[in-house]
Image (cartoon, rainbow, N blue to C red):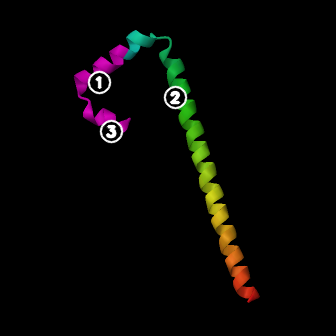
């Protein structure tokens, strides 16, 4: 979204905002933003969970290599 805003000028951005207000109405926009925020939050939580699982798996693999090396 950030890169998209970089390509939009002032008038284009105003036109997009105006179109959103026309399509959804002023009362629906807060609900849409709340849903968008919730979706982003869930995505970030899932990403953090996956990263921690990968790091934990790598630590376990390193421990196993060290233990296997000591056993020999």
Marks 2 & 1, CB-CB < 8 Å contact: no
Q: Which residue is mark 2?
A: 36
Q: Which mark is residue 3?
A: 3
Q: Which of the 4 quarters of the picture holds residue 13?
A: top left
Residue 46 in the image, given as x and y percentages of width and height: 61, 44
Q: Which residues are magenta?
A: 1-19
Q: CA distance from mark 3 to mark 2?
A: 18 Å
Instruction: Write down the residue under mark 1.
Output: 13
Q: Is residue 52 magenta?
A: no
> Which residue sits at x=34%, y=14%?
18
Q: Residue 60: give its label.
A: none
Expressed as whole percent of the image width and height from the top left, the position of residue 15 reads 29, 18
Say few, some or many: other residues with alpha carbon within 10 Å of mark 1 (under 14 / 14 to 19 / 20 or more): few
Name above or below for residue 19 compared with residue 40: above
Of the two numbered discs 2 and 1 on the same chain, state the one appearing first in sequence: 1
C-alpha separation, residue under disc 3 versus residue under disc 1? 13 Å
Q: Quadrant of residue 8?
A: top left
Is residue 48 depicted above or below 66 in this figure?
above
Residue placed furthest toward the right: 71
Q: Residue 68 sits in which quadrant?
A: bottom right
Image coordinates of residue 1 in percent, x first then y, are 38, 35
Mostly what secondary structure, the magenta segment? helix
Kind of element beneath mark 3: helix
């Amino acid at each position: 979204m950030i890169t998209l805003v970089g390509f939009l000028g002032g008038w284009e951005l105003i036109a997009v905002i105006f179109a959103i207000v026309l399509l959804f109405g002023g009362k629906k926009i807060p609900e849409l933003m709340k849903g968008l925020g919730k979706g982003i939050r869930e995505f970030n939580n899932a990403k953090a969970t996956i990263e921690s699982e990968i790091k934990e798996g790598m630590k376990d693999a390193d421990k196993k290599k060290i233990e296997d090396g000591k056993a020999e």
